[in-house]
Image: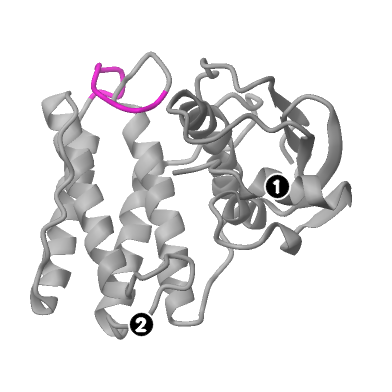
Amino acid sequence: MAPPTTLRLERFAQSAPSFPHFGEDEPVIDFLDVLEQKGAAFIDLTNRADLDAPVPCCPDWRLRDLALHLGHVWEWARRCVEEAAYVEESEAPLPDDELEPWLREQLGLLVAVLRATDPASPTWSFGPKPRLAAFWPRRQAHEVTVHLWDAQSAIGMPEPIEPGLAADGIDEVFTVFLPRQVRLERMQAVRDGVRIALTDGRSYELGDQMVAEVTGEPSQVLLALWHRVPVESLSISGDRDAAGIAFDRALTP
């Protein structure tokens, strides 16, 4: 079990600690292995499933749209690393019969570039400074993890996310996405504070004065933060309305 950790984001400070910031005995996650394995699982699933299946947590999206989105993200991330600069993400459509080989190509190219790139080399990213290539394996591991869950949901077979990986995904939400959402004025700071307690001993605080506590397994908390499951699926004590309002905010893009 990881040591108890509380991260308090008072008024969502514009800076964020470097990752990972848990105890030294925290198991190391090989983000490139996660990306490669879960990316392959995503492609295998979409290849055998009905591409017209709706994706429950992505309004107006079919499985085809989800697959195109993820493939374009893989292409975009690779180009950002290769060019060490921001590039525009493509939204070009693709015939269904070309989808699987294109996805495998984009995943393979991204993994190869990330494995060949020094994690300490400067590059563009939307994460906190210093902006280094190390940002991208972690970001893409969590990107594919959540979207694999989306794809599994589309066929009615969602699986929980591994606890350690989910806990790191929660850390990414608080240290990368929340400060960015506030900086870009996509959300307002939470007025009534909510403490988010994970069953492994870690906790996070939104806002100032805590009026509610939300407790859950890392997988379920991560999915709630990404608006994949309702906050009511977690254990809530104190002001339930405040907890609902906090989780309804645009905590993530």
Which image quarter holds the C terminus? Answer: top left
| Quarter-of-image position of residue 97 | bottom left
Under mark 1, the amino acid is Ile
Is residue 21 part of the magenta span, yes or no?
no
Q: Which residues are magenta?
A: 118-127
**Image location (x, y in percent) of residue 65:** 27, 68
Q: Are marks 2 and 1 in contact (CB under 8 Å)?
A: no
Q: What residue appears at the point 83 percent right and 52 percent down from the top-left corner? A: 240
Q: What residue appears at the point 69 percent right and 20 percent down from the top-left corner? A: 10
Q: Identify the residue position indicated by label 2 in the image.
A: 53
* Residue 245 numbered mark, or none: 1
How many angstroms separate mark 2 from mark 1 (CA)?
31 Å
**Image location (x, y in percent) of residue 112:** 18, 43
Task: Assign a secondary structure to mark 2.
Answer: loop
- Image label count: 2
**Image location (x, y in percent) of residue 92:** 11, 58
Which SS type dominates the magenta stretch? Answer: loop
